[in-house]
Amino acid sequence: MEAKDKVFIFDTTLRDGEQSPGATLNIQEKLEVAKQLAKLGVDIIEAGFPFSSPGDFEAVRLIGKEVEGPIICGLARAKKEDIEKAASALESAKKRRIHTFIATSDIHMEHKLKMSRDKVLKMAVEMVSYAKSFTDDIEFSPEDAGRSDPKFLFEILQAVIEAGATTVNIPDTVGYTVPSEFGNLIKLIKENVPNINQAIISVHCHNDLGLAVANSLSSIVNGARQIECTINGIGERAGNCSLEEIVMILKTRPTLGLYTGIDTTQIYRTSRLVSTLTNMLVQPNKAIVGANAFAHESGIHQDGFLKFKKTYEIMNPEDIGLLTSKLPLGPRSGRHALNERLTELGYHLTEEQLDKAFTRFKEIADKKKQVVDRDLESVVRDEQRMQETTTHYELENLQIACGTGLPTASVCLRRTSDNAFLKDAALGTGPVDAIYTAINKIVQVPNELIEFSVQSVTEGIDALAEITIRIREKNGAVYSGHAANTDITMACAKAYLNALNKLISEVGIQIKLYPQHGGLEAKRGV
């Protein structure tokens, strides 16, 4: 295929996707997602909005420094201070882009910006030109383009391209347009912006009416060559165009004459990672990555499928990375077999990492009898997260008593600094509440549990439980914890400790022995 037939994938999971209510990621989690997006093969990663917060600035800086392959992009309003902050955050990135924007619809200019068209046009041109002084790769977005006057849109696009914009992004910011209307807008831009051949046309569609993917598809049929999208379609309000859906449409329908550079076998793993870290579960009937996407329950469907798969499947599960293990792993499988399977799945572990993963694998295999790929991926992610976090406390023992009486938890933690074992017990409204109360009595670090989520990694009574929690420190900072275990109460305790360890490390808390009950007293460090 010719280069013009490629559709560039601009992933904004870490910027627009993270703006989903409750989907906040910390810096290390953003880096983990960015590295997976690079494996997936996205062309551009919009890593954040550097001016919005120190955390976003640091995330963009770290991703730019450590993630190779994709262009790393930072968002900036059409303001000098925003652009300077984005440029500074992107300084270490080998390939960098500044994405600047200003609203162009009458409703936004009048009620939000309180600016005239002439002033908006002037500011857009000045800020694109200013951004160009930091990098050659500049993207400009006329916010709310879907509701903008087309004539003004043509005028501002021509002006910003003359000023140096190399990509012009057309956002359907509020998800208002329908496919025929949005596709026609792209066609009109190609016909009415004289210098449009000097820039790539991009689109950014929201899903307020459930049309983000359809609008994006209509746009590329009419000449757009970059799609802004997110994993699992997450994003503000009803979300964004779903990366996995638009990519698999182009792969499944080659007659469109378009293609992407995405390694589709990484889609399912990326979806799972984002779902776990953001605590946003994928609905079972979600296209491509939902649990039911390749399930067949109807007798007629099952009969046809068993005779010839393509009767009811237009894609192979393997295409998105849903692999059937060629080498069944169970209690008698050895270290070498585990390593071989993890390598096939794309994980390359050090000897130390493999030792820890093998220990966890054996524990699970003794309980599950057969360990599937999703179990292995959960175990590896769990171990990687543990290694990325400084461990101040480890769970040594947990005993739960619950039923019709008062739920009770007895907890033993090991303090890693001096190998001290600390024990306490507590009552709770349920077993999880009792566990967390007992841990709090030992650790004595003030926090508020604000989110708690349980997700089954696989089907069946022996499935791994994957726990995601978020706690808020008294000054407002939020820390997430994750853990997976066949015993749901163990996973709950480990996830909570994972979050507490992060809080202690990042806030700088000094821990001292608490003599009254042998627990601990926590004080903020200087």
Image: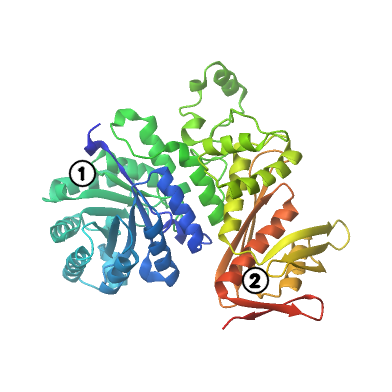
Residue 305 percent coordinates (x, y):
55, 21
Judging by the rendered image, the residue that carries numbered circle 1 is 187
Residue located at (57% from left, 30% from top):
324
Q: Alpha-carbon neighbours of circle 1 within 10 Å: few (<14), some, or many (≥20)?
A: some
In the structure shown, which secondary structural element does the residue marked by tag 1 occupy? helix
Residue furthest to the left: 194
Mark with earlier residue (1, 2) = 1
Q: Nearer the viewer, residue 236 or 15?
A: 15
Q: On screen, 22 above or below 230? A: below
Q: Alpha-carbon neighbours of circle 2 within 10 Å: few (<14), some, or many (≥20)?
A: few
Q: Which mark is residue 392?
A: none
Q: Nearer the viewer, residue 241 or 215?
A: 241
Residue located at (73% from left, 51% from top):
488
Q: On screen, 274 above or below 117? A: above
Q: Is residue 246 left or right of residue 524?
A: left
Residue furthest to the front: 351
Q: In terms of image quadrants, where is residue 440? A: bottom right
**Which part of the image, by quadrant, shows the N terminus?**
top left
Q: On screen, 338 above or below 209? A: above
Q: Which mark is residue 448?
A: 2
Residue 177 percent coordinates (x, y):
33, 50
Residue furthest to the right: 405
